[in-house]
């Protein structure tokens, strides 16, 4: 019980992968995500980040970086988290701005993670809202 309470306290303060993911999105440098991804990542992302299928983490970082290059994060807001002992789901709301047109895109990233030694991303869902 105490372990669960401490885990929840830690999670509510930092989410699970808040720092590396938030910094990657803010600065457009996604190599920082390599340590938080499982070897294979399942993706289902709607436009403008359109990616689907299963990829190695290196391929995912390369493809995601290429798609994100035409965007800039205007606002990042962590919106929810649900954690079990070794499984977690987090969601992140983004307001993205297209660099060329200036158009705004409202987007939600949903991260499905599991824990062996550390929390790692194994499925990423992206929804245009």
Image (cartoon, helix red, strand yellow):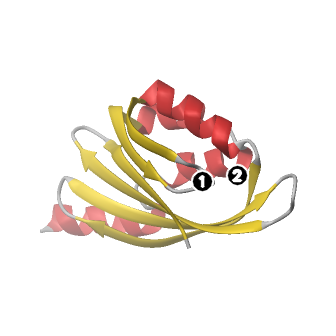
Q: CA distance from mark 2 to mark 1?
A: 6 Å
Q: Is residue 35 left or right of residue 6?
A: right
Q: Which numbered dot is residue 31?
A: none
The quadrant where residue 31 appears: top right
The residue sitting at 17% across, 58% down in the picture is 85
Residue 72 x %, y %: 76, 54
- Residue lying farthest to the left in this orientation: 1
The quadrant of the rendering that contains the C terminus is bottom right
Q: Is residue 70 left or right of residue 17?
A: right
**Residue carrying label 2:** 26
The quadrant of the rendering that contains the N terminus is bottom left
The residue sitting at 57% across, 33% down in the picture is 63
SS label for mark 2: helix
Mark 1 packing: few (<14 Cα in 10 Å), some, or many (20+)? Answer: some
Residue 93 higher or lower than 60, as above or below: below
Q: Is residue 33 left or right of residue 83?
A: right
Q: Nearer the viewer, residue 38 or 20?
A: 38
The residue sitting at 60% across, 53% down in the picture is 22
Residue 89 x %, y %: 32, 62
- Is the C-beta separation of discs 2 and 1 under 8 Å? yes
Q: Which numbered dot is residue 22?
A: 1
Mark 2 packing: few (<14 Cα in 10 Å), some, or many (20+)? Answer: some
The residue sitting at 65% across, 42% down in the picture is 67
Q: Is residue 128 left or right of residue 124?
A: right
SS label for mark 1: helix
Residue 12 higher or lower than 118, as above or below: below
Q: Nearer the viewer, residue 7 or 82?
A: 82
Residue 32 x %, y %: 56, 35
């Amino acid at each position: 019980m105490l372990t669960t309470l401490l885990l929840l306290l830690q999670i509510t303060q930092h989410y699970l992968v808040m720092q590396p993911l938030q910094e990657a999105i803010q600065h457009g440098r996604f190599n920082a995500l390599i340590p938080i991804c499982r070897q294979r990542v399942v993706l289902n992302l709607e436009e403008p980040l359109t990616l689907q299928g299963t990829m190695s983490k290196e391929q995912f970082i390369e493809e995601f970086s290429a798609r994100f290059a035409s965007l800039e994060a205007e606002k990042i807001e962590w919106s929810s988290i649900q954690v079990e002992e070794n499984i977690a789901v987090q969601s992140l709301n983004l307001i993205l701005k297209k660099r060329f047109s200036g158009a705004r895109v409202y987007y939600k990233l949903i991260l499905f993670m599991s824990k062996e030694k550390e929390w790692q991303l194994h499925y990423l869902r992206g929804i245009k809202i």
